[in-house]
Structure formats: C-alpha cells, structure tokens
Amino acid sequence: MAGIRIVNLTKTYQINNREIKALSGINMEVEDKSFVTVVGRSGCGKTTLLRILCGLEEKSQGEIYYTKGDMIISKPKTSMVFQEPRLMPWLTVGENITFGLRGESPAVKRQKADKLLDLLGLKEFKGAYPHQISGGMAQRVALGRTLCYDPEIILMDEPLGALDAFTRQNLQGEIVKLFINKEKTVIFVTHDVDEALLLGQKVVILEKGSIKKQIPIDLPYPRHPDSEIFFKYRQAILREILGNKEN
Ligand SMILES: Nc1ncnc2c1ncn2[C@@H]1O[C@H](COP(=O)(O)OP(=O)(O)OP(=O)(O)O)[C@@H](O)[C@H]1O
Ligand SMILES: [Mg+2]
C-alpha cells in the first residue's frame, strides 16, 4: 500500500543543443490505493512522467516520495503496462503471465496463472503463443502479467490505445473490476477524455509539461458516458484541454 507525492518534478531533455522541458514543476498527490488518470495532448509529458516514476528515466529536478499514512517509505514494487503488450514471443500465454514470478515453485506459478487466466477469460489460451492470439487478448495477458507480479503501484501508458473501440470498451470495464478499489495505486495515462473519466477517481490534465488542472471525479462505478453528470465532467475537461488552443 503506497501513495505517491510528486514535488516540483522537472524533466529537461537536450536535443541538438536545444533544451526541451518535457515536465516542469509538477506537483501531484496520488492517494494510496487510488486510481488517477492523466490526460493531455500528444507531447505534453504523460509518458515521461510514467517513465520517471517507473525508474526508466532520471528526473532533472524535484522529488518523488512514497507514503504510507503519514510515513515516507522506500519505493514500493512498481510495474508498468505499455501501449503494446510486450509479451515474450517464445513463451506461452500462461508462461507470460507468470514471467515476473521469480523463485516460485511451478505449482504456485500454475495456480496463480490459472486464477488469472480464468479472471481474464483466457483459460482456453493458456498454451497459445502470442502470435496466435488477438491484440485485445494480448493486452489482457499483459494486464494478467502485471496482476501476477502483484506490485503496489501500477503505471499504465495508454494500455488500450491500440485496440478497436469494442475491445477497448470491454477492457475498460474489466479494468474497473480488476483495479479500482483494490489494494493498488494506479496512474493511468490516456489521451481519451471519456476513458479518463470512466476510470479515474481523479483526472489530472497535463499541458505542455505542466499540470493545468486536477479534477476529482465523484461518480460511482461503473460509470455511464451518456449520463448528464458524465457529460458535464467531459465538457469541463475538454474546456481545459481545448481552451488554450484558441489563444
Ligand atoms: N528520450 C527523449 N529525448 C528527447 N526528448 C524526449 C524524449 N522523450 C520525450 N521527449 C520529449 O518530451 C516531450 C514529452 O514527450 P512524452 O513522450 O512524454 O509525451 P506524451 O504526452 O506521452 O505524448 P503522446 O500522447 O504522443 O504519447 C516531447 O516534446 C518529446 O519530444
Ligand atoms: Mg506517450
């Protein structure tokens, strides 16, 4: 169990002697076991934020604290789900799911894999290889692999971005069931406002590397995109994102 406190986080890249501020002065609180979505235009720094949190990238300035109640703790087990499933082509679906389990006995691995395969509707495909399953199924396997690894913090970078609308909707529903109100702290990046609203307990709007607004979403799950209140939230977020376009 862990919350994340991001203080004045800045990331600068150098391209051909030119400085690019991918993130500047990010201050953000992710409560323990909460599901936060980050939304914003292409290039606003969403992936950079997750890569820094995951440890794939160094920050330039600022601090990241992990908290448990009032205490600061060391970085907890963190896992990232990418836009593409990144499965091991030489391993079966079942083996991909248990990939992160080191030192567990084959029996324990089998038991954990079976439970998740069942949960994700992939039971019949346990022995299939990644090239034998669809994109939506592969992304399910990627979610299963993350769940099996059992991290406290899960970072998701547009994990449904490459999927068709139906599969995407399906998996959004599954993510609500699997991740929300569980013992996980999740940051989910998307450029899709409806997706951010369907999933997030808080929506963080990024613009050109800075936080434009953080909006708590006070709606129970499952959420309905055609409800009046959803519509109002959507308009509020779109206003924030599109507002500056006209300036
Ligand atoms: N490794 C890198 N080297 C130099 N610049 C980078 C690097 N990674 C990202 N950037 C720059 O940082 C900025 C933010 O990029 P980032 O990938 O975080 O955006 P994003 O919000 O994830 O965009 P998208 O929605 O297209 O995925 C961009 O201007 C990008 O060019
Ligand atoms: Mg990105």
Image (cartoon, helix red, strand yellow):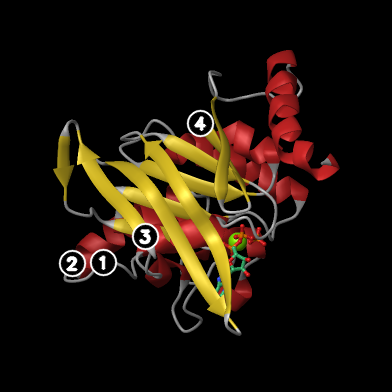
Image mark for residue 202: 4
Residue under label 2, please give it.
104
Q: Which structural element holds mark 4? A: strand
Determine whether, in the image, residue 221 is placed left or right of residue 65.
right
Q: Is residue 218 above or below residue 129?
A: above
Q: Kindly identify the amino acid type of the residue bearing the numbered disc 3.
A: Gln
Q: Is residue 221 above or below residue 154?
A: above
Instruction: Determine the CA span between mark 4 and mark 1.
Output: 31 Å
**Circle 2 — which element?**
loop
Query: Could one spot residue 64 in this view of the protein?
Result: yes
Q: Are marks 2 and 1 in contact (CB under 8 Å)?
A: yes
Answer yes or no: disc 2 within 8 Å of ligand 2: no
Lower sequence index among marks 1 and 3: 3
Q: Earlier in the sequence, mark 4 or mark 2?
A: 2
Work out how far the residue at label 2 is from the one at label 1, CA to CA, in angstroms. Answer: 6 Å
The CB of the residue at mark 4 lies under 8 Å from ligand 1: no
Judge depth for marks 4 and 2 and give the one in front: 4
